[in-house]
Image (cartoon, rainbow, N blue to C red):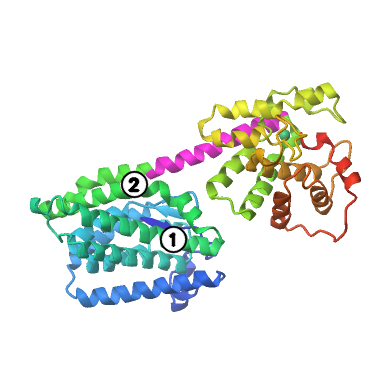
Amino acid sequence: MVNWLIGKLQFRTLSREVTLTYEHLTTVVNVPVRAKVLFYSIYLAAFATLVVSLIMEPALPWLEVALFMLLIFIADSFAIQLPKKASISVSFAIIFAMTVLFGPWVTSLASLITVVNFSDLRNKIPWYKMVFNGGNYVVSAFVSGYVYMLAGGAIGKVTAANFPYIIIPLSLSCTVFFITNTSLITLAIAFIYDEPVFNTWRYNFQWLTPNYYALGVLGFILSQLYVSSGPASIILLVVPLLIARQTFSVYMNLKSAYVDTVSALVQALEAKDPYTRGHSERVAKYAELTAKELKLPDDKIETLRYAALLHDIGKIGIARRILNKPGRLTNEEFKQIQAHPGLGAEIIGDIDFLKEAIPAVYYHHERLNGTGYAEGLSGERIPLLARIMTVADSFDAMTSTRSYRPELSHEEAAEELMACSGSQFDPRIVEAFIKAAGILLEDKKPNVKELQLRIAAEDTV
Ligand SMILES: [Fe+2]
């Protein structure tokens, strides 16, 4: 089950906040109006669902409900953090088992336990988000359970006579839970952080789709084992559930291994070329800001970030005396330096997850008018990510000190970008970068000729 994790607001210590007040539960601060509307709507919908559930199912099987609530609590407490602002646990399997065993009313009541778990407490998630998560599960469990019932799904024991028809309500219910649960979290993230809705969903949750159905199958098996063998049967499901959790964990570990690989490469480059110290990270930051301003999807931004961190990695193959030479380079030396985009593309070409970043690395010295290198491409033939990198790279080069000239101020560098906009740089990207970086420009016309001279070719090697 998917949970919303990272909060901008954090309470100082958990111990000071153990007493929940009405305000803690309902005060949503510092978030855009549309996000507030979403939170309050979910609170209200969850409250209404709980009231209706209690009316419809006044005689709860308390002991069994408590056992399943405990299982949900344990599963959620071992949640795994997802790429962005969300977490995942295997508790959907347990909720799904409850849907089959008890129907929508009992399941939505039991889902209230998801308001609190050790994982959220450890991460100091603000109360209002925890309540939102709990409300999300109550609503999702109810809606999916109701769909299961409407579609004619059997409650309790599923007999041979129910097959194969039972597959329809089971898959419908699983799909509805997945869509409701992930959509509500996607909306919350998109509203708060002003990110495009579909990209947020795709980046965080698309990969989860098959896993959700696998958890659904596990949940169904759990329900039937429970009917035939009682609570002890849960033990049989512990291992498959642990394996499911491990799948999520492996996915996330892979992501952090990617970051480690990139960091190791950046460190190797920085050891050789002191100029790049901090440069790669800054270029990555500028490129990311620009890409967000251009509303690129998250996966493209991730690729751009890797490419920006590694854009000069090819310099590993260039002689140290040329890289660290004080003053201007001779033509021959400059030619050697010009080989670095090609070398960089070769180096990262052997690393599977960096394949997408190759064009941005290879073409990061191209110019819009075709006078750049490595291929002399022009206009839109230069890949978009490479065009973004060129702007970010040039800006950082101009605002860093070189032995042959002092650094330019941010405003001066931005003016130079504008002056070369259309010839060297893509005007749309320059505009987005300046907007995103929040650079205030003086309202004056720059002396184009002088400025273009100042962007010496060596500035951005
Ligand atoms: Fe470069």
Q: Nearer the viewer, residue 379 or 153?
A: 379
Residue where numbered disc 1 is placed? 185
Q: Residue at x 45, y 40 (%)?
A: 253
Q: How many marks?
A: 2
Q: Residue at x 33, y 63 (%)?
A: 140
279 sits to left or right of 452: left
Which residue type does callout 1 highlight? Ile
- Compared with 249, 138 (above or below) is below
Q: Secondary structure at mark 2?
A: helix
Label 1 residue near ligand 1, CB within 8 Å: no
Quarter holding the C terminus is: top right
Residue where numbered disc 2 is placed? 211
**Other residues around mark 2 within 10 Å, as few (<14) / some (14–19) / many (≥20):** some
Is 441 covered by the magenta stretch? no
- Compared with 163, 312 (above or below) is above
Disc 1 to disc 2, C-alpha distance: 18 Å
Residue 117 is at least partly visible in this image: no
Q: Residue at x 48, y 73 (%)?
A: 37
**Other residues around mark 1 within 10 Å, as few (<14) / some (14–19) / many (≥20):** many
**Magenta span covers which residues?**
248-272
Q: Nearer the viewer, residue 367 or 256?
A: 367
Q: Residue at x 47, y 62 (%)?
A: 187
Q: Are marks 1 and 2 in contact (CB under 8 Å)?
A: no
Q: Earlier in the sequence, mark 1 or mark 2?
A: 1
Which residue type does callout 2 highlight? Asn
How far from the left and from the top, in percent, is residue 378? 71, 37
How far from the left and from the top, in percent, is residue 182? 40, 58
379 sits to left or right of 356: right
232 sits to left or right of 86: left
Q: Which of the 4 quarters of the picture holds residue 96?
A: bottom left
Residue 416 is at least partly visible in this image: yes
